[in-house]
Image (cartoon, rainbow, N blue to C red):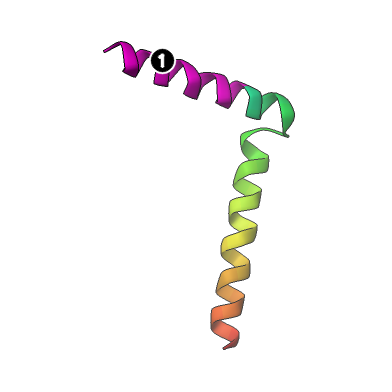
């Protein structure tokens, strides 16, 4: 149980760091959409 608590704390902390150092969730989703769109273009162009 102790290990799980440590893991959750670390996960939350990394999420907090991510939000502070990036535009936030919207930026992440934009990156994901950009990557998936690019891969779709590459596969359809083949």
Q: Residue furthest front?
A: 3
Q: Residue at x 65, y 59 (%)?
A: 34
Q: Is residue 39 left or right of residue 1?
A: right
Question: Which residue is depicted at the point 60% across and 86% down?
Answer: 45
> Can you give x and y, in whole percent of width and height, for residue 21 in the image?
73, 29
- Relative to 39, does residue 24 appear above or below in the rendering? above
Query: Which residue does the numbered mark 1 point to in the structure image?
Result: 6
Relative to 4, 10 lies left or right = right
- Left or right of 20: which side holds 33? left
Image point 68% across, 41% down: which residue? 27
Tally of numbered tags: 1
Q: Position of residue 39 (x, y in %)?
A: 57, 70
Camera-nearest residue between 45 and 6: 6
The overriding secondary structure of the stretch rendered in magenta is helix
The quadrant of the picture occupied by the C terminus is bottom right
Residue 15: say if magenta.
Answer: yes
Is the residue marked by circle 1 packed among few (<14), some (14-19), or many (20+) residues within 10 Å?
A: few
Quadrant the N terminus occupies: top left
Taking depth in this image into account, of 29 and 4 the one nearest to the observer is: 4
Residue appearing at x 60%, y 56% in the figure: 33
User: Quick check: 6 above or below 45?
Assistant: above
* Residue that protrudes farthest toward the bottom in the picture: 46
Instruction: Name the spot of residue 42 as percent of width and height, x first.
Output: 60, 78
* Magenta range: 1-16
User: Outermost residue toward the left?
Assistant: 1
Image-quadrant location for residue 19: top right
- Magenta-colored stretch includes residue 14: yes
The secondary element bearing badge 1 is classed as helix
Q: What x and y, as percent, mark residue 24?
A: 67, 32
């Amino acid at each position: 149980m102790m290990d799980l608590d440590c893991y959750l704390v670390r996960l939350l902390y990394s999420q907090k760091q991510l939000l502070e150092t990036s535009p936030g969730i919207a930026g992440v989703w934009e990156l994901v959409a950009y990557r998936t769109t690019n891969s779709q273009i590459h596969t359809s162009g083949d």
